[in-house]
Amino acid sequence: MKILVPVKRVVDYNVKVRVKGDGTGVDIANVKMSMNPFDEIAIEEAVRLKEAGIATEIIAVSAGVAGCQETLRTAMAIGADRGILIETDIELQPLAVAKLLKAVCEKEQPQLVLCGKQAIDDDANQTGQMLAALMGWPQATFASKVIIAGGMATVTREVDGGLETIEIALPAVVSADLRLNEPRYATLPNIMKAKKKPLDVISPATLDVDVTPRLKTLKVAEPAKRSAGVKVANVADLVARLKNEAKVI
Ligand code: AMP
């Protein structure tokens, strides 16, 4: 079974992002970029399925600027067998990425696409769902457990009320949630080995996909600053303030 894992290059989760002065977006010049954390979890799950003898090949795919090669090498250091970079300088929106992934799925014929539940930069939570719709495949989002057997995937999903377990037929799209696993660290020997693994670079035009943005960002702004808190003298003071100032009791 072939597994395709889409991996996105995003601003590292430890970076405190700054909004550009003109409000057109966030400043990513000289900022540390890393693999989207949920995609790391997706890669880890694919590697575990390969180690269990269920998957035979793991293909990591990234769409974006040339720097995404680094993200693909990280995926290969964790255990992906090869990488595909769909290189473009155009800012990609989820629908464009889903169309690109559809074209790759048609070529590679994976049985499973294991993506992240959302990218931590745009927080869209759309790409996997759009891909499943475009392919006409079943989907199981927010997975915290995945069991593959007999051409089916049994997926436990994190939903508002707790956990939901569903069974879907393969090929399918599954998106990884935080509790699915704890990704391993890439070891130095594996980082070195990953440098020699195959990495194809193609363009959206090769896949015959138009990636022109459909949505326009009107304005990006910093969240409002939190005002300073106050120390209360005792419980009676707290209750009085909640009653008279905050008016919540
Ligand atoms: P989003 O819909 O943007 O929140 O992203 C959900 C998931 O889709 C991510 O966790 C990735 O697995 C995948 N994805 C989104 N954008 C890209 C991209 N440019 N390249 C590769 N995978 C992507």
Image (cartoon, helix red, strand yellow):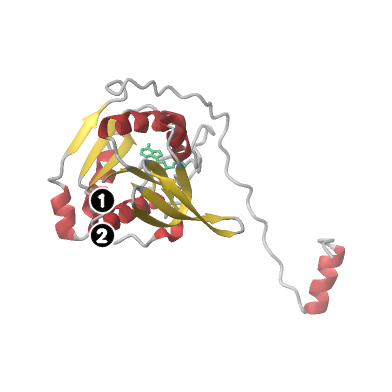
Disc 2 under 8 Å from ligand 1? The reply is: no
Badge 1 vs badge 2, beta-carbon distance below 8 Å: yes
The spot of residue 67 in percent (x, y) is 28, 38
Q: Give the residue drawn at x 60%, y 46%.
A: 223
Relative vertical location of residue 215 with respect to residue 139 in this rendering, above or below? above
Q: Give the residue drawn at x 71%, y 67%.
A: 230
In depth, the one of 169 and 233 nearer the eye is 169
Disc 1 under 8 Å from ligand 1? The reply is: no
Residue 116 seen: no
Relative vertical location of residue 102 with respect to residue 172 in this rendering, above or below? above
In depth, the one of 72 and 79 nearer the eye is 79
- What separation in Å lies between label 1 and label 2 (alpha carbons)? 8 Å
SS for tag 1? loop
SS for tag 2? loop
Give the quadrant of residue 82.
Answer: top left
Q: Which residue is under mark 1?
A: 55
Is 229 left or right of 222, judged from the image as shown? right
Q: Give the residue drawn at x 30%, y 52%.
A: 46
The spot of residue 203 in percent (x, y) is 28, 25
Residue 226 seen: yes
Which quadrant of the figure shows ligand 1? top left
- Point out the image quarter for the C terminus: bottom right
Is 29 left or right of 186, judged from the image as shown? right
> Three-letter amino acid code at disc 2?
Ala
The spot of residue 137 in percent (x, y) is 42, 37
Q: Which residue is under mark 2?
A: 52
Give the quadrant of residue 48.
Answer: bottom left
The spot of residue 234 in percent (x, y) is 77, 79
Q: Give the residue drawn at x 67%, y 57%.
A: 227
> Three-letter amino acid code at disc 1?
Ala
* Residue lying at the far front of the rendered structure: 150
